[in-house]
Amino acid sequence: MTQLQSQTKTIGDHRFEVFKLPPFEAQDVLIDIGQIIAPALGKAAKAFTGDQQVDSLLDIDVENPHLATGIAELVRNITKPKMRELVHTMASVTHCDGTPLPKVMEITFRGDLPLMYQWLWFALEVNFGNFFPWLGTAIKDVSNQAVAARYQSTSNDAGRQ
């Protein structure tokens, strides 16, 4: 998909068409999302260390204090101005039922916040859906290289005095 192509999705009674953000705006949004989510993920990840095996979201121990700390951190990091900025940025590249979303946003989402968040998630997927698989692959590659380098350096030291 090029920058000028779009993806459409019907959510509720509305058809949303979302275009890609310009590269520097996308980068700014990605940095904002990272600053909000990364600390929370770090704290919540402690809930999944050790012997706990989680095969489904339903298996998550919601009473785990690490998970609660991660959720609290996420809520603490989302400010009203930053959330409003994110919504307006994503609205700027969205049409709702053929009309630019900023022109009909108040009417479309009034009394229907779930619709707004479903659209927002879709808009984020359109713009960043290809980034996270790439990031996961890059992190895995760097991790594998670090393990290989550590193994190489320890195997070279074997038998030295």
Image: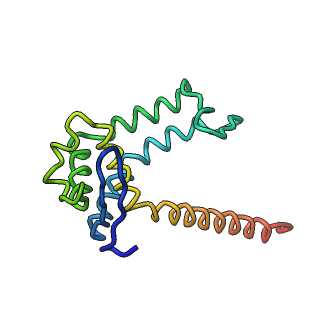
**Residue at the spot 26% in from the left edge and 64% down from the top edge:** 25
x, y percentage for residue 101?
20, 54
Asked which colour scheme the image uses, the reply is rainbow
Across and down, in percent, residue 97 comes to 24, 55
The answer to whether residue 101 is left or right of residue 30 is left
Q: Nearer the viewer, residue 94 or 139?
A: 94
Instruction: Name the image quarter holding the C terminus.
Output: bottom right
The answer to whether 159 is drawn above or below residue 47 in the figure is: below
Q: Is residue 106 left or right of residue 70?
A: left
* Image side of residue 56 versus residue 91, left or right: right
Image location of residue 21, percent across then percent down: 29, 66
Q: Is residue 103 above or below residue 117?
A: below
Q: Quadrant of the N terminus?
A: bottom left
The residue sitting at the right extreme is 159
Instruction: Pick out the residue farthest to the top.
Output: 63
Residue at x 80% of width, y 68% of height: 155
Considering only vertical position in the picture, is 102 above or below 113?
A: below
Q: What residue is drawn where x is 50% and y is 43%?
A: 42
